[in-house]
Structure formats: C-alpha cells, structure tokens
Amino acid sequence: MKLIFSGIMIPVSTIDWYGRSASVIFFNGCNFKCLYCSNNRFIEVSNRLEPLFKGGVVVDIEEIEKHILHAKSFISAVVFSGGEPTTQYDALEHLSKFVKKQGLLVGIETNGYYPERLSRLIQQKLLDKIFLDIKAPLDDSHKYSQITGGKEDAAERVLHSLNLKGVPLEVRTTVFRSLDGVLEIAKFLADKDCTYVLQQGIPENAPDDRIRKEKPLSREELIDLASSISFLKDVRIRTKEKGEEKII
Ligand code: SF4
C-alpha cells in the first residue's frame, strides 16, 4: 500500500496531544483550501497525481511503519495530521491498525469533513482521540464555505463529526483578527464533554493577502477571548510564546 506523504514526521512531540508524548505524521493533501492554511506547502499544485493529492511524495506504507517503530520507545501515541488524513482513508486505517498493534494510542487531527470515515475508525476501535478543527460557527454554512475554499456542505458535515460518540474529543479553532466567531462556535460545545483550544493564528503563513497583513492576536488578547467563554468547562490557549495554557 502507498501513502502520499508530506515528507514530514515529528518523531516525538509533546504539544500535539496534551499530556502525552506522540509521533506526528503529516499526510499530504487536503480537500479544503483554507484562507489561512499554514500547511499550504502540503497542498501545493503539481501534476504528479489526481488533484486532491498534489505536491506529495508517494511512499510505501512500510516506510512510515519503520519510522513509527524507531520512535516507539519514546512515545505512547501516534497522531495523524496533514493536510487531511481522512482523504487517504485506506492508508489511515492500515496505519491505525499498525499503531494499535504496537500498543500505542491513535489520535487524528482532522477538519471533520468526513464523519463517516471517522465513524468507521471508531467502530473498529482504532481511534483514541479526535482533534477536530472548527473554523467558523456551524450554523453559518456561507462563512464556513468562504473560509474553507468553497465547500457548501462543510459546516453540516463538520457538525456530524462534532456529534460522533465513543471517543474523546478536543476542538480547536485557529484565531485571526478578521475571522471572528469564537463565541458562536463555543455555543455548539456547551453540551459536549470536550476541551476547546484557541490557537494563535500565524498571519504571515496565510495564502490570503488580507489575512497575511494582519497582526497576530497577542497572548493577552487570546486569554481575554478564552475567559469570555466561561460557560465551557475546559478552555485553553496555544501561543508561540507559552505553548498550551489552561484558562478555564
Ligand atoms: S483543513 Fe487544515 S490543512 Fe486543509 S486547507 Fe484547511 S488549514 Fe490547511
């Protein structure tokens, strides 16, 4: 089996899964085209493969397994990230089975567009944590579509992912000055047992000109924003300066 790989693996990370040491494997390719995507080098256009998977390197899946085995003594989990890992479902399922066989936990960082694929992994007990990126209020399909590059059904499908049961959930929003909506997103989390993390957006990496010219939110501004959603039980911020901090 082959994987279209970004070429990037972090053998040992302590920031992607709070409280754990995990390897992070970045799949190549994404079905969204977000205005602020800092991973846009993974979705660059080339003519190597079908449009969804442009710009990556095709590797044998055993190559990735070898990297996981090398890191195994230093980690308790593997996180699949991207790009969007669910776009290569067969490789994702195969690697998740491999990781579980090693006695490690599996996490996935996802944009939530494929709830049925996440559900298949949950049913097979191949998933231990979902890190779900929510980019705009889920009742505003127009805004969601604008941010993610034109997918009209994005908000609806992400809402399905948010409502999946049977696996712990962390929701993340990357925050930029011109893209407000954190309070509205938070309202969808009020009845969920999840962590909500506000990530400091890095405008300089954004493909969108307008966002690129913005000043990033400061740590203090993010703390204020996080404090304003005190109706949630567990709210954190993640900044360049201090990493992850629990605010509520
Ligand atoms: S979902 Fe993530 S990887 Fe895909 S375009 Fe958006 S920010 Fe980039």
Image (cartoon, grey):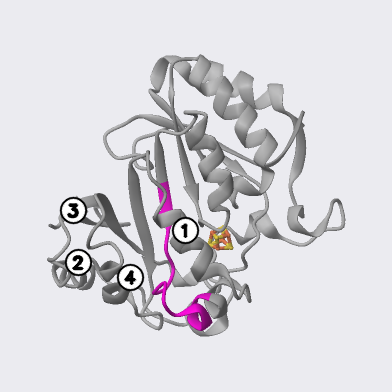
Of the two numbered discs 4 and 1 on the same chain, state the one appearing first in sequence.
1
In the rendered structure, find residue 234 and report the number of the disc placed on it.
3
Q: Position of residue 104 (x, y in %)?
A: 43, 21
Q: Residue at x 56, y 80 (%)?
A: 146
On the rendered structure, is 41 left or right of 178?
right
Q: Amino acid at mark 1?
A: His
Q: Residues within 10 Å of mark 4 (few under 14, many from 20)?
A: some
User: Closer to us: mark 1 or mark 2?
Assistant: 1
Of residues 77 and 171, the one drawn nearer to the viewer in this rendering: 171
Q: Residue at x 32, y 57 (%)?
A: 240
Residue 128 lies, in percent from the top left, at 40, 33
Tell which tag, 2 or 3, sits nearer the viewer: 3
Give the class, few, some or many, for how many residues have Cα within 10 Å of label 3's Cα (few <14, many ≥20): some
Q: CA distance from mark 4 to mark 3?
A: 14 Å
Question: Which numbered disc, 1 or 3, marks the residue closer to the eye?
Answer: 1
On the image, numbered disc 1 is attached to which residue? 160
Distance, label 4 to label 2, CA atoms, is 12 Å
Q: Amino acid at mark 3?
A: Asp
- Per the model, the C-alpha gap separating discs 4 and 1 is 14 Å
From mark 2 to mark 3, how far is it between C-alphas? 10 Å
- Lower position in the chain sequence, tag 4 or tag 2: 4
Say which amino acid is labelled 4.
Ile
CB contact under 8 Å: marks 4 and 1: no
Q: Amino acid at mark 2?
A: Ala
* Label 1 SS: helix
Q: Nearer the viewer, mark 4 or mark 2?
A: 4
Give the label on residue 7, or none.
none
Nearest to N terminus: mark 2 or mark 3: 2
Q: Is residue 205 magenta?
A: no
Residue tagged by mark 2? Answer: 226
N-term mark: 1 or 3: 1
Quarter holding the C terminus is bottom left
